[in-house]
Image (cartoon, rainbow, N blue to C red):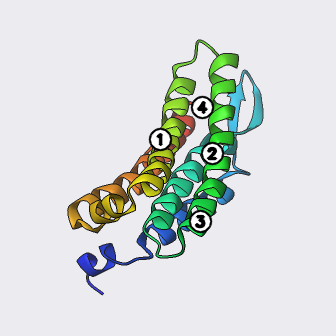
Amino acid sequence: MRFSGALNSRHLFLYSGFGLILLAFLFLPMRTAVMIGIDLDYYWIGWIFAPVMGAWGLASLALWLSEFSMSRGRVLQGLSLVCVPIYFSLAFAVFMVIYVRVNWSWHLFFALILGPCVIASVAAILYAAKKQKLAYSLKNQRTRSLAFIALIAVPLLYTVIFLLAFTIFS
């Protein structure tokens, strides 16, 4: 299958969503060694990456559900089930921004969780109001490829940049 054929697949957002959620579960138990004075301590850092990857994976699943051809009630039920964990991760991000006020990285963390919340909410609202308009915009290959690239690139770049920062500066 050519790349353009893969971008037109109905299961593109499904596979990317489950892939990101699987990566989130794999990154969750990650630890890193940090040298403090003469002691070497291990800190759990997986909870920094897992909510971001999981939220973007759930946003990808929301886009997949919005272009699915089931009954309207079933799709809205699936969208609400996808939005609930995203909102829980947003509540966690808000708690971390309030709890750790001075650190700029938590504001970035909040922004990266807010993005999938907006995507999933807009997909649910547009599906409920104007299903044909959302389906038509997702059929456009340019829009579809940009959405796919954004859904994959943002959480992976965040993870790679912070992993490099932890390995270089610790």
**Which label sits on residue 170?**
4
The front one of 167 and 141 is: 141
Q: Which residue is mark 3?
A: 73
Given this view, does label 1 or label 2 mark the residue nearer the observer?
A: 1
Given this view, does label 4 or label 3 mark the residue nearer the observer?
A: 3
Q: Which residue is mark 1?
A: 118
Mark found first going from the N terminus, 1 or 4:
1
- Residue 145 visible in rendering: no
Query: Vertically, is 98 above or below 109?
Result: above
Mark found first going from the N terminus, 1 or 2:
2
Mark found first going from the N terminus, 4 or 3:
3
Labels 1 and 2 touching (C-beta < 8 A): no
The front one of 115 and 165 is: 115
Labels 1 and 4 touching (C-beta < 8 A): no
Residue 14 point in image, percent of width and height: 50, 70
Question: Residue 74: which quarter of the image?
Answer: bottom right
Given this view, does label 2 or label 4 mark the residue nearer the observer?
A: 2
Labels 3 and 2 touching (C-beta < 8 A): no
**Identity, as a three-letter code, of the amino acid under mark 1:** Val
Count of numbered circles in the view: 4
Dot 2: element:
helix
Dot 1, crowdedness within 10 Å: few (<14), some or many (≥20)? some
Dot 3, crowdedness within 10 Å: few (<14), some or many (≥20)? few
Dot 1: element:
helix
Given this view, does label 3 or label 2 mark the residue nearer the observer?
A: 3
Q: Residue furthest bottom?
A: 1
Cα–Cα span, label 1 and label 2: 15 Å
Q: Which residue is mark 2?
A: 51
**Identity, as a three-letter code, of the amino acid under mark 3:** Gly
Mark found first going from the N terminus, 2 or 4:
2
Mark found first going from the N terminus, 3 or 1:
3
